[in-house]
Amino acid sequence: MEREQARFEGVGARPKLNYSAVMIRIPPSLTAISAALTLSACAQLGMGQPEDSGAPVVANPAQEVALAPSDLPEATAADVAAVKADPVLTSAPPPPKAAKTQEALDTTTAAQRSQAAAPATPEAKLLGTTIASLGSPTEPGFWLKTPLVQTETRGRVTNKANGKSSAVTLIPIDGPATGGSRLSLPAMRLIEASLTELTELEVTLGG
């Protein structure tokens, strides 16, 4: 009788989904580096770095006053095609092979970080929102790999938790527009996003 009751109680039960697993798949090859970053994320983020060793730039207060998503016009395919990627944002050299810490992996210069932290342009157009995880820490520069674009272009990501933003190169990846994205380590640090958790981002076209 108990077996029959258990069998019928299972009928129609709603399965529990692991939404994080559905949205984001982190390559196994990043596990070792991610573990090292986890150990230093709380204690070292933005502290004790020399000028060009990856120290985050303090965001301009103007960044905090961003337009609400409903106030931004949506970007069209023609808009995206008209905006060219900024090579400066991804021109940093690759980190040393032995690099394991945030500071060693972030090879962006002070000039690049200042450019990424500059206030958003008023003509920004909305591409959408996405859930992002940390991308490959060995790929230098400010970038977001996302299914929200079909061609490489210039854009901006805003951390919806704190309003901080960074200019980035938007790089297309396969998947539905609702799929997850991957954000570079320097951009993660600039917008003060957790390196070990998922971050909700607003993505706009233009710098």
Image (tube, helix red, strand yellow):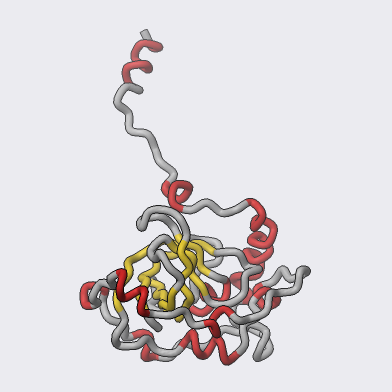
Q: Nearer the viewer, residue 38 or 74?
A: 74
Q: Nearer the viewer, residue 92 or 63?
A: 92
Q: Quadrant of the C terminus?
A: bottom left
Task: Give left or right: position of 107 versus 143.
Answer: right
In this view, the residue farthest toward the right is: 98
Determine the image quadrant of residue 73: bottom left
Q: Is residue 131 above or below residue 5?
A: below
Q: Is residue 21 above or below residue 78?
A: above
Image location of residue 158, percent across then percent down: 39, 75
In this view, the residue farthest toward the top is: 1
Q: Residue at x 40, y 55 (%)?
A: 179
Task: Give left or right: position of 12 versus 105.
Answer: left
Q: Residue at x 27, y 81 (%)?
A: 67
Q: Residue at x 68, y 75 (%)?
A: 94
Image location of residue 1, percent across then percent down: 36, 7
Image location of residue 22, percent across then percent down: 44, 47
Image location of residue 120, percent across then percent down: 37, 86
Q: Residue at x 68, y 62 (%)?
A: 33
Q: Count numbered badges in the picture.
A: 0
Task: Give left or right: position of 132 versus 42.
Answer: left
